[in-house]
Image: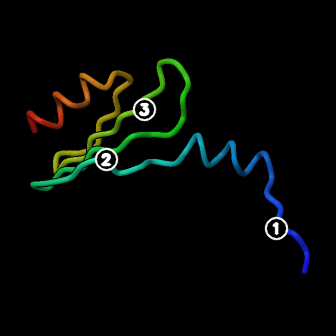
Amino acid sequence: MSGFKIKVKDVQDFVKSELVLYASGRGKRFFVRIHAGPNVERYVVETNKGTVGFAKAGEAVQHFNDS
């Protein structure tokens, strides 16, 4: 049986693109992006009005709570 191999490029692409669901309710969802770069829209709030990205957690949480 051959060993399972992954590629660095695949890992980097995953880290830059993957969103993880943190919270949801009342037609809205709060995602956290795995990517850990500065000024990256790491927090994403999705509502029936659309999707908004935030670089700061506090702003994202406020938007989620106000929506």
Cα distance between the residues tagged 3 and 1? 30 Å
Q: Is residue 54 above or below residue 27?
A: above
The residue tagged 1 is 4
> Which residue type does callout 3 highlight?
Arg
Q: Is residue 45 left or right of residue 5?
A: left
| Mark linked to residue 22 | 2
The residue tagged 3 is 42
Q: Quadrant of the C terminus?
A: top left
**Label 2 with label 1: CB-CB less than 8 Å:** no
Pointer 2 local density, CA inside 10 Å: few below 14, some 14–19, many at least 20: few
Q: Which one is earlier in the sequence, the residue at label 3 or at label 1? A: 1
> Which residue type does callout 2 highlight?
Tyr
Query: Which residue is located at x 66 percent, y 46 percent?
Result: 13
Q: Is residue 14 left or right of residue 10?
A: left
> Which residue type does callout 1 highlight?
Phe
Q: Is residue 9 above or below residue 1?
A: above
Q: Quadrant of the N terminus?
A: bottom right
Cα distance between the residues tagged 2 and 1? 30 Å
Percent x, y for residue 34? 50, 39
**How did the renderer colour the structure?**
rainbow
Residue most extreme to the bottom: 1
